[in-house]
Amino acid sequence: MSIKTILLHLANDDHHAQRLAVAVRLARKFEAFLDFLHIVPVRSEGGEQGEGHSADLEHKVRVACRNASYALTVIEGDPLERMVERAAFADLLILSQMEIEAAEGGADQMPERLALRMPGPLLVLPSNGDHDSLGRHILVAWHNSRTSGRAVRDALPFLKRAERVTLLSIDPPGLGGEGDSRELGEDLSVFLDRHGIQNLNLVNISTDDPASDAILRLAEENECDLIVLGASGHSRLRSLVMGNVTRSVLEQTRVPVLLSH
């Protein structure tokens, strides 16, 4: 997989400039096209809401994207549905971290809802920092599952450019780090080595702490600047619901997370 189209949701919120800067840096790194999507509420007949807003965003995009290829589309409708539609034609979608205090099912939980419906990876940016070093030291949170396998494959463009890659596998308590996860982690390191990724460090732990705590603790201790994670989820009342590990990581992380489902 290569990253040739990056989709960014434009909104004039507190973290807009951060998202835009990261998107432009990644577009230059991967020689990718930037697809900006500004979604506005459906206007009533004769209404002009959002036009000045869109003009301001267009100016900011034009200034930030000098010497970069991009397109900006203003469209009406539901943000989730519109982004899911557009994501079918992108290799990566960038969005901001949801807020911990968000109401259940509210708009601020967009990242987790999108991750479970997208055909490709979602890069979630925490609200702290500018993330200039994103992708230098990557932590892969590995679990032998379809979603983990998908996440690793989607992350290959980042992994191939990383200076260091840490592979984390977690066993249940009492196995002393010698459970099945270690062997599977070794298999993953062989797989990545065949892709030319050789700067690997395999970490296998046994803990009764929540997996999300172990992932975030290791990322902080090793100064990782990107976490690769398979987005687990299940169906409930006809809706896709994020798994506890994925949700906890998204709520608490101070490191960008690359999610795939």
Image (spheres, rainbow, N blue to C red):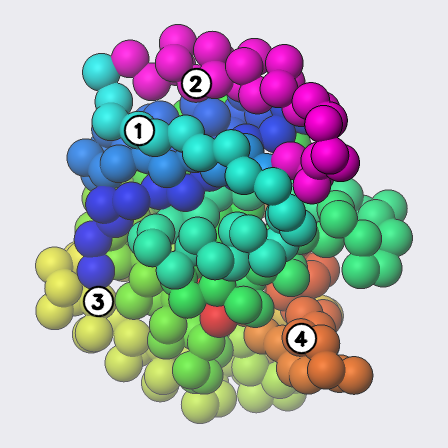
Quadrant that contains the N terminus:
bottom left
Residue mark closest to the camera, 1 vs 3: 1
Q: Report whether residue 83 is seen.
A: yes
Classed neighbour count for the residue bearing mark 4: other residues with Cα under 10 Å, few (<14), some (14–19), many (≥20): some
Give 252 or 216, whichever is nearer the viewer: 252
Q: Classify mark 3: helix, strand or loop.
A: helix
Mark 2 to mark 3 CA distance (whole Å): 36 Å
**Whole-percent x and y of residue 106?**
80, 53
N-terminal of the pair, mark 2 or mark 3, is 2
Q: Which residue is mark 3?
A: 192
The magenta region covers: 40-66
Residue mark closest to the camera, 4 vs 2: 2
Q: Which residue is mark 4?
A: 240
Mark 1 to mark 2 CA distance (whole Å): 9 Å
Tags 1 and 3 in contact by the CB under 8 Å rule?
no
Q: Classify mark 1: helix, strand or loop.
A: strand
The mark found on residue 196 in the picture is: none
Q: Which residue is mark 1?
A: 70
Residue beneath the point at 47% across and 11% down: 59
**Whole-percent x and y of residue 235?**
68, 83
For residue 89, above or below residue 14: below
The mark found on residue 61 in the picture is: 2
**Is residue 44 shown in magenta?**
yes
Tags 4 and 3 in contact by the CB under 8 Å rule?
no
N-terminal of the pair, mark 1 or mark 2, is 2
Q: The disc labelled 1 sits on which kind of residue?
A: Tyr
Tags 1 and 2 in contact by the CB under 8 Å rule?
yes
For residue 240, above or below residue 14: below
For residue 131, above or below residue 3: above
Q: The disc labelled 4 sits on which kind of residue?
A: Leu
Give 154 or 55, whichever is nearer the viewer: 55
